[in-house]
Image: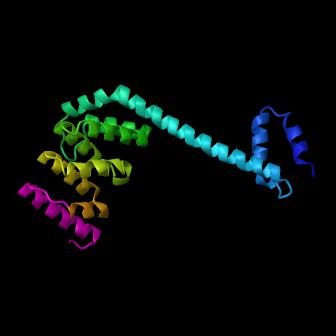
């Protein structure tokens, strides 16, 4: 059987010698216990490849986030201000956000959360964002969507609070039930609404209340 080095020498005649060599080294069947140096080299290549993948992924996400912040924030804010949100009916801003989520969900969620936090004193923006989040699935928006909805529950504006409740109602998970079951608000009609939502979710989840 030809040695590892003879295989490497023969691989240099191919069109892509670097790819051939890397493939050869990655193939563990060519590295036996009698070659500790090659085994260490293999471990180094693998760990280096993993690090490069992580760096590349982080770079892509960061680049996408910066692009969203610099180019699309004003557009999103304007779309929210111009839209009339109705439960069960998609608006132009819903389509816009879904497209951004398809392109890079991690960056899009981070970007939307940043806008939510920076506009926490602006109920109109918060209501718009919560409407959008509630129309996406629980796991699509996790965890930023749930954090925004939870923050909405303690906002001073009742409409923002209601949108937070409706978001958890829309996701209809056991976690939604747990959160709403522990929410207390000062507005009687909203507290009564929360009570009804908790009852409905309890039946859906077959879980006790209280």
**Residue 113 appears at what percent x and percent y?**
32, 41
**Does residue 141 sit above or below 79 in this rendering?**
below
Q: Nearer the viewer, residue 115 or 98?
A: 115
**Does residue 133 sit above or below 32 in this rendering?**
above
- Image quadrant of residue 176? bottom left
- Image quadrant of residue 10? top right
Question: In the image, what residue occupies the spot 80% across and 35% down?
Answer: 17
**Residue 14 appears at what percent x and percent y?**
82, 34
**Residue 102 appears at what percent x and percent y?**
42, 40
Tell me if residue 173 can be seen: no
**Residue 7 appears at what percent x and percent y?**
87, 43
Question: In the image, what residue occupies the spot 23% across and 34% down?
Answer: 80
Q: How many marks?
A: 0
Tell me if residue 103 can be seen: yes
- Judge left or right: residue 154 versus residue 23: left
Question: In the image, what residue occupies the spot 30% across and 50% down?
Answer: 147
- Image quadrant of residue 195? bottom left
Q: Outermost residue, right direction? A: 1
Confirm whether the magenta stretch covers residue 197.
yes
Tell me where the magenta segment starts and ends, as one range.
Answer: 183-210
- The chosen color scheme is rainbow
Q: Nearer the viewer, residue 158 or 155?
A: 155
Q: What is the quadrant of the C terminus in the image?
A: bottom left
Question: In the image, what residue occupies the spot 79% across and 31% down?
Answer: 15
**Does residue 162 sit above or below 8 in this rendering?**
below
- Judge left or right: residue 205 versus residue 195: right
Confirm whether the magenta stretch covers residue 90.
no
- Judge left or right: residue 14 versus residue 170: right
Query: What type of secondary structure mainly makes up the magenta span?
Result: helix
Q: Nearer the viewer, residue 87 or 198?
A: 198
């Amino acid at each position: 059987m030809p040695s590892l080095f003879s295989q490497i020498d023969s691989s240099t005649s191919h069109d892509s010698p670097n790819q051939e060599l890397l493939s050869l080294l990655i193939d563990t069947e060519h590295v036996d216990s009698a070659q500790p140096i090659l085994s260490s080299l293999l471990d180094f290549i693998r760990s280096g490849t993993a690090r490069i993948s992580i760096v590349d992924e982080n770079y892509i996400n960061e680049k996408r986030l910066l692009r969203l912040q610099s180019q699309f924030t004003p557009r999103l804010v304007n779309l929210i201000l111009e839209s009339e949100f109705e439960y069960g009916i998609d608006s132009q801003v819903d389509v816009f956000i879904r497209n951004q989520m398809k392109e890079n969900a991690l960056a899009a969620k981070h970007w939307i959360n940043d806008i939510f936090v920076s506009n926490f004193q602006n109920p109109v923006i918060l209501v718009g964002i919560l409407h959008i989040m509630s129309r996406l699935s629980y796991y699509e928006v996790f965890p930023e969507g749930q954090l925004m909805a939870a923050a909405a529950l303690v906002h001073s504006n009742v409409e923002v609070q209601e949108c937070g409740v409706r978001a958890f109602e829309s996701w209809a998970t056991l976690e939604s039930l747990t959160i709403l079951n522990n929410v207390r608000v000062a507005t009687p009609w909203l507290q009564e609404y929360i009570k009804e939502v908790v009852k409905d979710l309890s039946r859906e989840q077959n879980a006790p209340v209280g």
